[in-house]
Image (tube, helix red, strand yellow):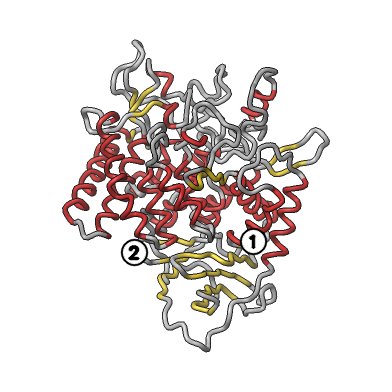
Amino acid sequence: MKHTNPSLVILLCCICAACTKAPQIDRNSIIDAYAEEFNSNDEEIYIQKFPNTEAAEFMKANIPVFECPDAELERTYYFRWWTYRKHIKETPNGYIITEFRPDVPWAGLYNAIPCPGVHHFEEGRWLRDTRYLDSYARYWFLDGAAPRAYSFPIATAFLDYASVTGNKDLLIEQYDNLKANYAAWEADHLGPDGLFWQMDDRDGMEFSISGSYSDDWTGYRPTINSYMYADAMAIAAIAHIQDKADEEAEYIDKANRIKELMDKYLWDEEDEFYKVIVRNPKPEFADMKRCPAREEIGYIPWVYGIPDADKSQAWLQLLDTAGFKAPYGPTTAEQRAEGFMETDPSCCTWNGLSWPYSTCQTLTGLANQIRRFGSGNPVTKEDYLEALNIYSNSHRLKREDGRTVCWIDENLDPYTGEWYARNELLSRDDYPYYERGKDYNHSSFCDLVISGLMGIQPGIDGSVTVEPLVPEGLWDWFCLEGIVCQGNEITVIYDKTGRRYGCGKGFFIYKNGRKAFHSNSYAVKASI
């Protein structure tokens, strides 16, 4: 459900036999080198379907190859595929994707947790083998799976996955389950004013500043309302596929009502930001009053195309060091806020620490903002790449022997890059889950490169657009090879001199091995 504002639209057609073939990328050598590096640095503690010995072969068979002049960004891209592979788990009911690899008591059936489910689908939709996510989608409506144990825009996740695979049958198969899931949210989380409420912990965002104003940590949050808007629009799209016009209109009306209420109540005109309205407040705080602090979750509406252009000034806070900008940020609350980074007995606070879960949402929203509103935007392609690089560079851990290795865990100190929860848990002698957060699968990264930076944007209607966010003139070359999308294989290449890939100068798109488009510049929006 992502919207864009084209700078230049080019229709790709008439792929004739005379077109140049795609250059051959040595994907095996690239993947072998990265897999060997990551394997050699790894303490393999918890093994699921694919052990490290099978990492390279899994990646060769499944992932798109990405090359760019930024060695650290490229390294993180492969590292995150290497860790995603660790979370594919085979169960008696098929494959699932896990968040933690050790079993944790708050998980559901087979140790699955719905909180990061949408990120699992956004990331994994680019795998060539669809068995893993087809099975994972069906898992969520098994007895014991508990898709509403945490906030989870499941219809949106399914729709975005099907937009890559082209498998509408899966959407139709799950349509009644998705409607029933939506109705269950309405039954127990819809407030009398028409907004949805959630506990911050059930958003996966415990001990937040906004939650601290409430007796039960609940509020009418930008998170759950954005998710319910997105799911209503996704269900409407699935109804459209089946020519169910009345149901399509019903869910579009639901979505429009949520947007209207979010703009009326959650949008703070003075602070120019979506905020939490506190529910069941503590005595000193008025009922139905907005939390005074801006929190990073205020960017989630942009993930789903909710805000209009008049709310674009909110993005200036991402660039402000008194707002959310930090060396290993963004922070989960604005740094000027009362209560920012206050200590708490939990290692999982959301009052300022940097969380990859939230960072990937913010970056998705930022990409949508740049594409949708084009010129006059307060944020630019340079801002997107800078934020992506900050996120990429946070994927590191300095070991006691002085070596720096790739790492992903739960949360970070936004100023030092230290893995906060990891340090806290390792200091506890009696903690039962050794390296609980190691290889934590609570966010996306590769999707931010593929759909964000490289700009591969598929639609459930069969459309595919390519609109890179690489700042113009920055890189002399880049390549994303082997994207399988709606049954076609797509490769995008930019080569300023023509010597890197040997296919000529400029920007190329190849479809099923044949040249489909060429331009001197990659500052385009090309529609296939």
Which residue sits at x=70%, y=55%? 71
Q: Residue furthest front?
A: 92
- Closer to the chain start, of discs 1 and 2, is 1
Which residue sits at x=61%, y=47%? 49
The residue type indicated by label 2 comes to: Asp
Residue named by callout 1: 60
In the image, which disc is placed on residue 358? none
User: Badge 2 local density, few (<14 within 10 Å), some, or many (20+)?
Assistant: few
Q: Position of residue 285 (x, y in %)?
A: 34, 15
Residue named by callout 2: 461
Q: Position of residue 155 (x, y in %)?
A: 35, 47
Residue closer to the observer: 377 or 251: 251
Q: Secondary structure at mark 1?
A: helix
Which residue sits at x=44%, y=60%? 164
Q: Position of residue 272 (x, y in %)?
A: 37, 37
Q: Examine the image and state in which quarter residue 220 appears.
A: top left
Which residue sits at x=32%, y=50%? 234
User: Badge 1 local density, few (<14 within 10 Å), some, or many (20+)?
Assistant: some
Q: Residue furthest right?
A: 401
The residue type indicated by label 1 comes to: Lys
| Position above or below: 444 against 342 | below
Q: Is residue 418 left or right of residue 287?
A: right
User: Disc 1 vs disc 2: which is toward the camera?
Assistant: 1
